[in-house]
Image (cartoon, helix red, strand yellow):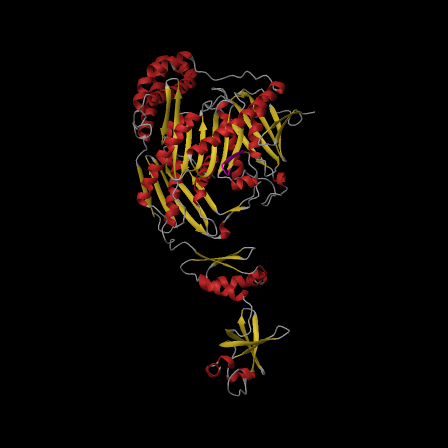
Amino acid sequence: MPETFMFELGNRTMTLEVGELAKQANGAVLVRYGDTVVLVTATMAKEPRADIDFFPLIVDYEEKMYSVGRIPGGWGRREGKPGEDAVLAARMIDRPLRPLFPEGFRNDVQIVAQVLSVDQNHSPAISAMIGASAALTISDIPFKGPIGGVKVGRVNGEYIINPTQAQEDESDIDLVVAGTADAIMMVEAGAKEVDEEGMLQAIMFGHQAIKRICAAISEMGAKTGKPKMQVELFEPDPAVAEWVKDYAADKLMDALKTDDKQERQQDLDQVQSLIHETYRAQFGEEQYEEAVKSINYMIDKLTKDLVRKMIISGTRPDGRKRDEIRPISIKVGLLPRAHGSGLFTRGQTQVLTVCTLGLKSDEQLLDNLTDEDRKRYIHHYNFPPFCVGEVRPIRSPGRREIGHGALAERALLPVIPNEEEFPYTIRLVSEVLESNGSSSQASVCGSSLALMDAGVPIRRPVAGIAMGLVKSDEGIAVLTDIQGLEDALGDMDFKVAGTREGITALQMDIKIGGVSDEILRNALAQARKGRLFILDKMEEVIDKPRPDLSPYAPRIITMEIPVDRIRDVIGPGGKTIRKIIEQTNVAIDIEDDGRVYIASTADGDGEKACRLIESYTKDVEVGSSYVGIVKRIMKFGAFVEILPGKEGLVHISQLSNERVNKVEDVVNIGDEILVKVIEIDRQGRINLSRKAVLPNAVEKA
């Protein structure tokens, strides 16, 4: 029988079950939260990998479509590669766990979260994060946890732990916060222009719930946990470490004081080569081969220590002050055929974002565990190898690209106009052309520029800034607009995006045991100052959306038709709508509720398409006049099509004011004539008159 541990989370019960499932994993926990059920396992390789210099942690979040009672799409009807939501969930679980493993730990560790059942009011991703922490805690894998994680919402000023779907719809904050009982480890948030203090209170409110989660997992670990395995941790040879310090410290410091990223890297590479060559010459080939890993480890450690001491003492690698932003350059309208484009350059980070406007049918279709089946605003982020001066194959987007694209998308979402105001599908693509830190936030800035250049009526521009932290016994430094070196060797990457009114997106990752609310408050205040500075620079170039769309963007006309007339517009086998499209050179989307979107470019005639669609949905009215086409001629009169598919008879006596002996004396097949509806009989037959609209008849009337 499984052992069960229960605790309250968001006024609902979460249950952790241990001992029945997946018993060959190092640790396994079944999480139940409402009707959401997630199985999380933690497994570790028995031996460390010898050829790596990092901790090999893998987190897989497996979405099973049976969990929501669906069969997967596609030919195979089988779950394929992870969708975007699954990738984001895996990254969210990875980020607070990774810093809590021992330094020098080189054994492969894999976390697998299998989503078995989903209740939309109980987040499977949050359940998986808590399950991962619990599985690691009860396992024999060395782990300095536990952690907890919660979602925080705010409805009418009241903060809510793990809001329901209905509450999320009303909330102005969508926050995920994770941490230990002592400190915050990870923050991921979207918001509707919330001020800094409101966001900080939400984070700290979430941390109170995290403390309760950690206490429950610690109790579970004490009762059911295995003794932690003694694993081999990599440590450098002490003699080699001392030699590298003595020989290389000054040389590395001189190389680090170069402003340009590529020059600095070249100088560091030269110093590294010199260290290896000197050691080989001094101690011989055999001893050198034994010392290579220690030498490389010490070069990295020494570089990190020197940069951190430099920053704490008040000198950043490129000479900037702690709150100083790199030089900014902005351009819009670079690409003549694109619907909108913006180039944002900050120091040696450069991003080109391109905006494309499309139809309703261009929306992205979703096949995931949520109730949403499509979205009309899409943001993609690309990070090609040339942006950092590297050579490698360009593959499909990785987890980093998906994560950065989702962050930029979240940052812009609160200012995107709704579908009623702007009935377009919007796609933004951020191409990173050069990278030296904070490319995701440069993408946010470039996206605002591209949207305004395209004429999308966004509420106000959004800018982003990345903050950093160096924390040591000598002091604490919060840095504005961190570059790549400060990100790699610092303790925090804290990205903040928003408008002048407030925060729209937030993401924080740390590499230490957590940060305090005081550090977060200082970082948020410093980020606001930087964000407003960048917005000033952007608005000097373009301060509001252009009044007109690009001539190459589609013009969309919206109209509504009765639902029971949709079939008349589409026609048998789509014949009618295809005919309209061919005649007018437009694209047409018809929704199930009767909304019609007509998109035309320069060579299309949207107004004509609109009139044609109206003609298929109109009812013939007695007393109204129509221009019709003669379709058939009989001895007793002519049949005239006055609306698509609707014909009436003009009797021979109604063709003219004069006596008509033969119908062909007045009209022939294919003639366009003006007629008036004089009667619709009980059988629905339409009787028309040409005579009634002739000049003499009108004058008499």
- Toward which corner of the image does residue 135 lie, by quadrant? top right
Would you place residue 439 above or below residue 295 in this image?
Answer: below
Q: Is residue 551 left or right of residue 16?
A: left
Residue 523 pos. (x, y %): 39, 29
Residue drawn at x 54%, y 66% is 618
Locate residue 559, reporting x and y percent. Answer: 49, 59
Q: Horizontal placement of 89 versus 538: left or right?
A: right
Residue 671 is at least partly visible in this image: no
View extreme (top): residue: 239
Q: Which residues are drawn in magenta?
A: 155-160
Q: Nearer the viewer, residue 585 or 614?
A: 614
Residue 102 image point, x, y percent: 49, 19
Q: Is residue 507 above or below residue 590?
A: above
- Is residue 567 depicted above or below 126 in this figure? below
Please determine whether, in this image, residue 547 is positioned above or below residue 169.
Answer: below
Q: Nearer the viewer, residue 329 or 536?
A: 536
**Residue at (56%, 60%) from the top-left corner?**
562
Which of the pair 109/594 is nearer the observer? 594
Q: Whole-percent x and y of residue 176?
A: 50, 33
Q: Quadrant of the N terminus?
A: top right
Q: Is residue 524 left or right of residue 41?
A: left
